[in-house]
Image: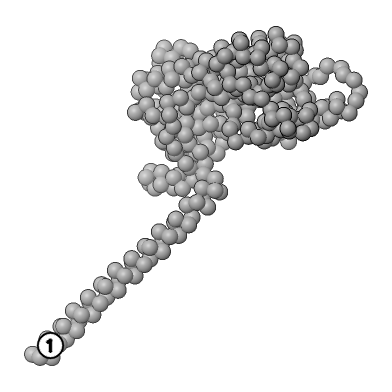
Amino acid sequence: MKRLLNKLGELFVNLTQEEKEILRQSVLIIDNGYSWLGQLNLAMEIIRDSFPKAEISVLTFPERKSNLQKDFPTFNFILPYENLRPKRYQVALQMLKMRRKKSDFIILFSLDITPIIVALVFLKSKVVLYNQWGQWWSLRLRVVNGVFKFGYIKKKARFNLKNILKRIGLFFVLLQLKDKEALKHSVLVIDNGYTSFGDISCTIQRIKESLPKAKISVLTLRQGEELKDNFPDAEIIRAGKCIIKRYRIARHMIRLRKNRYDYVILLNLDITPVVASILFMNSKVLLYNQWQQWWVLKPKSIKDYLITTPQFIFNVIIFVYLLISVSWIFLKRLFNIFKLNNFSIKRT
């Protein structure tokens, strides 16, 4: 039964092996062109400390690039294409051109509505705002039941078309004050009780190497005190009771879906946590196995099925052809044996 479920899972989930730096982040900083350079430098220093192994890119303007590049020579600086028109939308248009290269984090320095729309709707990355008062805010689209709940009190501004459009845009965007917590990752490690402490410790160590400020939680069936002694820096979550013990982990994962974890890391391919993480967690799902290999789990897209369907049909045709050929040869052989037997009987 277990093997059958695993085979069925392969029809709906893609499992691909990735390189060791899978937790390495990519960060895109959007310079609006009129933020104070001192504020921009301070924010970039904080970002560099929060993502020591990240690939950090800065979308800025030519007149500001030379000043920023002196202090941050390892950053990748991107200039908007000058021929993009209208000029005031050059940053947003350049972001649209970069949508294929998805960034894990997008850092904004103003509430310009066009970059916000591009970041949230088209790039679908984690968006953070750093404002002139040194505050870090997380931005995301409101869910339907939260459209009329306001999470951000805007400073008074002039009554003009630009500010009216900004207010309308922010009606659909949820802003939450997070301070530096906005740059921290939340990681959930799934321990079903069959993994050794050594493997769990190795997993946590790998996470800290790439994401030193990550908040790590371990969902487990074991006793909390035993794990706390081995992993004092991690939050230990003991799975709640369930009539069927093997479903305890998956059931508790569904309860934790509101925590919006950035990563869910599985330590084996137990089918129930895989299903719960793919269907309910809305996180990036990874597998770190006993051979210290990183794998990415994703639900198969329509494109995957369109690619595999012709191959499947071709295989079915080949199978049917071979089946008919083998059956025909077998029938001919039976017929020949039957004729031979009848001829032998008549002669006798």
Identify the residue at image location x=66%, y=17%: 65
Q: Nearer the viewer, residue 303 or 276?
A: 303
Residue 289 appears in the rendering: yes
Residue 43 in the image: above or below residue 114: above
- Is 114 left, or right, of 309 in this rendering? right
Identify the residue at image location x=52%, y=15%: 52
Percent x, y for residue 290?
Answer: 35, 28
Task: Looking at this view, name the residue that lies furthest to the left.
Answer: 348
Colouring convention used in this rendered image of the protein: one colour
**Would you identify the image quadrant in which residue 35 lies?**
top right
Identify the residue at image location x=89%, y=28%: 161
Percent x, y for residue 223?
Answer: 42, 20
Q: Nearer the viewer, residue 24 or 241?
A: 24
Q: Nearer the viewer, residue 92 or 148?
A: 92
Percent x, y for residue 9?
Answer: 45, 44
Q: Nearer the viewer, residue 264 or 271?
A: 264
Identify the residue at image location x=48%, y=55%: 309
Residue marked by disc 1: 345
| Label 1 Cα neighbours within 10 Å, binned few <14 / some 14-19 / many ≥20 | few
Percent x, y for residue 297?
Answer: 48, 36
Q: Quadrant of the C terminus?
A: bottom left
- Is 299 left, or right, of 128 in this rendering? left
Residue 330 in the image: above or below residue 231: below
Residue 138 appears in the rendering: no
- Is 149 left, or right, of 211 in this rendering? right
Q: Amino acid at mark 1?
A: Ile
**How many numbered callouts?**
1
Q: Secondary structure at mark 1?
A: helix
